Amino acid sequence: MVDFDVSFLKSLDEPGSPREVSFNFARRNYTCICNAYPITNEEGFTEGKILVLQEKKKVVKLIQRFSGSYAKFQFSDIKGKNPRFLKQVELAKIAAQSNSKILLVGESGTGKELFAQAIHNYSSRRDGPFVAISCAAIPRDLIEAELFGYQEGAFTGARKGGHTGKFELADKGTLFLDEVNAMPLDLQAKLLRVLQENEITRLGDTRPIPVDVRIIAASNVDLLREVEQHNFREDLYYRLSVVEIFIPPLRERKDDIDLLVDYFLERLSRDLKILKPEVSPEVKEIFHAYQWPGNVRELQNCIERALLLSGGKRIAKEHLPQRILQKVEGNLRIKDSPPLVPLEENTKELIKRAIELCNGNISLAARTLRISRSTLYRKMKEYGLR
């Protein structure tokens, strides 16, 4: 026998307005998503309703499947041979085998989500959901609702039937908090409590919901410095950084550039269904001279652009973005120009040469330098040339 409260049926007048219901059946408690579809007679009057119950766990899995809540990258997708970089990869593999919280620190474009997905797929939670949320991309007023969900009527504009938050979607899996440094301070306190209690409360509700979630957080700035500047809670920092992994920027691992270029060419040419082209030596030199402020993501985008413009033929200098060429040429000009010397040394050398060219004739040397004799004598005394 099924035992549940049917009073909610009155609010299910419109198809597509699902409600969450709980009931006991065969000594088990079920939480389901319920939809009601009206049965009408020939005159168009409603005579009854057909209830469609779907177990919430299965619905959540479908949502995860179609909303991209899964991890597609493995550690085999992380490319590099730089010793410092490989050390962080090994640390990530070790951390993946526990349920400890992980903090990934690295500039934008270094591959923090790639690491997070690889950690998830290397862990015992690999069959569970991987849910990512960017704390910087969601407006301040909405991020709490996105994380913890809300009940119907919790606030103006709240969706009918409420909203399942990221913590619930990530149950038995991994929640990736990207750019956690952008999280408002008041929400940091609530997050800390969730991490301590392992349960959330939806907005507009008082009922706590247990969650079993592994947290991986990421920051594109030094979080410890944010703590010192009172922009981030110290207790939350230590709660999140059980294992801290620092992903170096591409400019500090330039020995990986050739390997990454080859990897992106192989993958992108396959996706675009064109032959993998060669890269000219000049382009390789430019790649190594450029500082890559956008890191690996910028390199990938640059390769994709060059591949499209080259039409699968040899990638040359003209296929690269102008901003990269201008920056590299500017750096090379500075590098190839003679070193600057102090003004005093230049002045002293100029006076010496003028006196030598004029065979020691001070008056002629002064006229050559277009200064008065008295000024020349003063400069000679100043630089010890008498």
Image (cartoon, grey):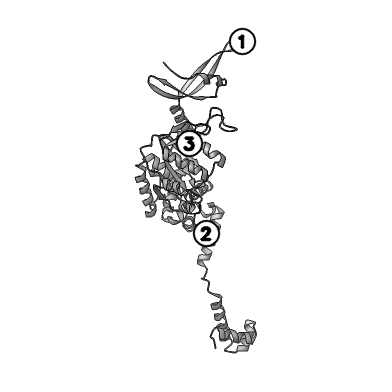
Residue 375 horizontal/vertical position (percent): 62, 84
Which residue corresponds to mark 2? 328
Tell me the distance, in whole angstroms, between the alpha carbons under discs 2 and 3: 43 Å
Report crowding for label 2: few under 14, some 14 to 19, many 20 or more residues within 10 A (C-alpha).
some
Identity of the amino acid at label 2? Val
Which residue corresponds to mark 1? 43
Tell me the distance, in whole angstroms, between the alpha carbons under discs 2 and 1: 78 Å
Residue 11 horizontal/vertical position (percent): 56, 21
Instruction: Classify 255 as above or below 66.
Output: below
Label 1 SS: loop
Instruction: Classify 105 as above or below 41.
Output: below
Q: Which of these two is toward me, 216 or 157?
A: 157
Q: Earlier in the sequence, mark 2 or mark 3?
A: 3
Q: Earlier in the sequence, mark 2 or mark 1?
A: 1
Q: Which of these two is toward me, 357 or 49?
A: 49
Number of marks: 3
Label 2 SS: helix
Query: Depth-wise, is mark 2 or mark 3 nearer the camera?
Result: 3
Instruction: Classify 155 as above or below 49.
Output: below
Report crowding for label 3: few under 14, some 14 to 19, many 20 or more residues within 10 A (C-alpha).
many
Identity of the amino acid at label 1? Glu
Identity of the amino acid at label 3? Lys
Q: Which of these two is toward me, 41 or 239?
A: 239
Query: Which residue sits at x=60%, y=12%?
Result: 45
Which residue corresponds to mark 3? 166
Q: Earlier in the sequence, mark 3 or mark 1?
A: 1
Report crowding for label 1: few under 14, some 14 to 19, many 20 or more residues within 10 A (C-alpha).
few
Instruction: Quadrant for the C terminus, please.
Output: bottom right
Q: Is residue 238 visible?
A: yes
Query: Depth-wise, is mark 2 or mark 1 nearer the camera?
Result: 1
